[in-house]
Image (tube, rainbow, N blue to C red):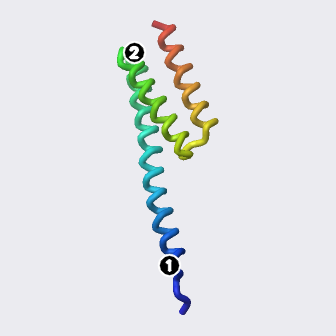
């Protein structure tokens, strides 16, 4: 039976750690988007603060390479556009 190389074991361990860390960051981004959309639909004055927080989390994820720069820009643009449309309707 072949022996598993220690470098392969470490590589697997590290990739698992990164996967969990990335999953956590992606989840935080999704949660902040949902929070912002819920506040915006209720026309809550805290929606602007939630938008800023969401943009910060998206930028953090993009900076770490968890989501691509273009995906981050697209998400931010769409949410800003959504916020502006709700603000204009008031």
Q: Quadrant of the C terminus?
A: top left
The image shows residue 59, relative to residue 11, as above or below, that is above
User: Alpha-carbon distance for marks 1 and 2?
Assistant: 56 Å
| Furthest residue toward front | 7
> What secondary structure is found at the residue carrying circle 2?
loop
| Furthest residue toward bottom | 1
Q: Residue at x 44, y 24 (%)?
A: 52
Q: Position of residue 12 (x, y in %)?
A: 50, 69
Q: Residue at x 45, y 35 (%)?
A: 57
**Do labels 1 and 2 touch, CB within 8 Å?**
no
Q: Position of residue 83 (x, y in %)?
A: 49, 18
Q: Position of residue 40 (x, y in %)?
A: 42, 20
The image shows residue 20, relative to residue 41, as above or below, that is below
**Residue that label 2 marks:** 43
**Residue that label 1 marks:** 6
- Nearest the viewer among 12 and 43 is 12
Q: Quadrant of residue 2?
A: bottom right
Q: Quadrant of the N terminus?
A: bottom right
In front: mark 1 or mark 2?
1
Question: In the image, 71: left or right of 10?
Answer: right
> What secondary structure is found at the residue carrying circle 1?
helix
Q: Quadrant of residue 50?
A: top left
Q: Residues within 10 Å of mark 1 (few under 14, many from 20)?
A: few
Q: Residue at x 44, y 52 (%)?
A: 21
Instruction: Please tell me which of labels 1 and 2 falls first in the chain.
Output: 1
| Furthest residue toward right | 70
- Nearest the viewer among 83 and 7 is 7
The image shows residue 9, relative to residue 88, as above or below, that is below
Q: Residue at x 42, y 48 (%)?
A: 24
Question: In the image, 77: left or right of 13?
Answer: right
Q: Residues within 10 Å of mark 2 (few under 14, many from 20)?
A: some
Q: Position of residue 48 (x, y in %)?
A: 42, 18
């Amino acid at each position: 039976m072949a022996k598993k190389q220690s470098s392969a074991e470490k590589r697997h361990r590290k990739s698992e750690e990164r996967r969990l860390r990335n999953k956590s960051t992606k989840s935080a981004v999704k949660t902040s988007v949902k929070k912002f959309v819920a506040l915006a639909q209720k026309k809550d004055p805290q929606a602007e603060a939630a938008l800023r927080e969401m943009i910060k989390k998206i930028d953090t994820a993009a900076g770490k390479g968890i989501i691509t720069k273009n995906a981050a820009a697209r998400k931010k643009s769409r949410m800003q556009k959504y916020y502006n449309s709700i603000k204009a309707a008031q």
